[in-house]
Amino acid sequence: MKDLQNILAGVEVLAVEGSRDLSIEKIEFDSRKIQKGDLFVAIRGSAMDGHEFMETAASFGARALVCEEFPREKNTGTTYIKVSNSKKALAQIASNYYENPSQDLKLIGVTGTNGKTTIASLLFQTFDVAGFKTGLISTVNIRVAQKEFETDLTTPDSLTINYYLAEMRDAGVDFAFMEVSSHGIAQERTNGLTFEGGIFTNLSHEHLDYHKTFAEYRNVKKLFFDELPKAAFALTNIDDKNGPVMLQNTKARKFTYALKNNADYKARILENELTGLQLRINDQEVWSKLIGQFNAYNLLAIYAATDLLGIPIMENLQYISKLNPVAGRFQHFISEKDKITVVVDYAHTPDALKNVLQTLNALQKKNQKVITVVGCGGDRDKTKRPEMAEIAVRLSSKVILTSDNPRTENPDAIIADMEKGIEKEDLKKTTANSSRYQAIKTACAMAHKNDMILIAGKGHETYQLIDGKVNDFDDLKIAHELINQLDK
């Protein structure tokens, strides 16, 4: 149990009706989970408004409720706390409830459109190999030292974040690495957290169904850096035109990285093959198992952050040379018989798809075809669909348009949106099949000796969301099975 007064420390309280001298069992923002003695926080969401469930929470035994407006009728014996922003209040309350765990470890946030998962996950790998107890909050999973937990959000809700940070603190974790999404920033999920540093990767077309304009999307990312403390570091990719913007108002120590422009951390690609990358970073050479220019940026960010966190340079280079690719990020295999290269990648934005295909084009030998299987998610930003298809067709020999996670949308309608980005003369390079399994099967059947197949969009995901149902679906596993059948 925790004292309500302590839980509310730092929260901008506008009014209170009822006693503050209370003990709270736990915090919830889902009224269905409320038990006697809990604190309920009413959150306004895009689909539901928690204020409509305050009476339910009180009837279930909520001892106190946090809200942006008081209900007309109040439950006797329940304390009502009015705040201007419930989401912001929840984040601070969660941090207070778990005794501000982010202050007891070195927390690094990674934000940008592409590369967040790779950078956060590989920083976890690096510091784990270096002998530190390490934590991770990412799209792929949550790690508390050697314990692994599943997650379905890039940046979880603030209660979940603080719960796992507290688990990390209690496990003796030294460093924690966390993906920070634009949704997470906009919804105040990271409010109340103390960051040791922030990393900006890049910015491109994404989430405009939520943020409405690119400027709004960029400015939300910038907010993360604006709020970093003076003692933290802000590390940004200045080859991206939005990179310098992130540093404009930050109080943190400023550092830059780049492949093209002058920067504090500068790299050059010496070799780029399917076996890996040879890089020169600040006059030191290093080889990595990762592939492609986009991974050169990721590795440079990892090198810079690791240096800023105190790892000696030569050790740093050794760790980079041992890093293993992250699940679903340019994950590939080569078939035994026909030497067909199959790449599975999470690329679900125009820029990410372009990066992966440009990498394959650079690796492409004479007479090799690049066959791309790609779809777009349902109930998400529709404006990127034609752009995704245009990029796929322009940079591939053959393209099979298919479903991604259609959710509640008709997959054929999503494909029709994508086809709007394809010129008539390029339609001959394109086919469509709303069955993702059949699309992958078609790509495998099309491929001849030494060809390359890209299966884009879902990466590490082992499911497909169709009509509200979660169906087992693993791109990598299915591709292995189909290619093996052809090899026999």
Image (cartoon, grey):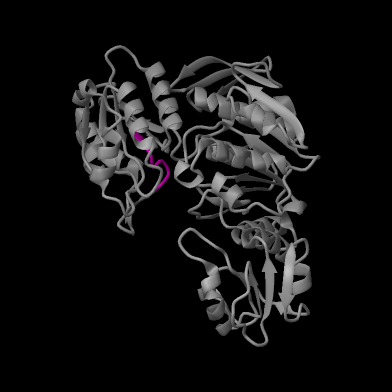
Instruction: From the image, give the main secondary structure of the stretch colored magenta.
Output: loop
> Residue 12, image x and y in percent?
74, 62
> Residue 323, image x and y in percent?
56, 33
Residue 396 higher or lower than 333, as above or below: above
Residue 327 higher or lower than 68, as above or below: above
Instruction: Locate the N terminus and report the quarter of the image it occupies.
Output: bottom right
Q: Can residue 318 be seen in this view?
A: no
> Residue 276, image x and y in percent?
49, 23
Front-most of residues 410 and 271:
410
Task: Please state the extent of the stretch shown in magenta in the rendering.
Answer: 455-461
Residue 372 is covered by the magenta coloring: no
Front-most of residues 405 and 131:
405
- Left or right: residue 467 versus residue 276 is left
Front-most of residues 341 and 38:
38
Residue 459 is covered by the magenta coloring: yes
- Outermost residue to the front: 72
Instruction: Locate the C terminus and report the quarter of the image it occupies.
Output: top left
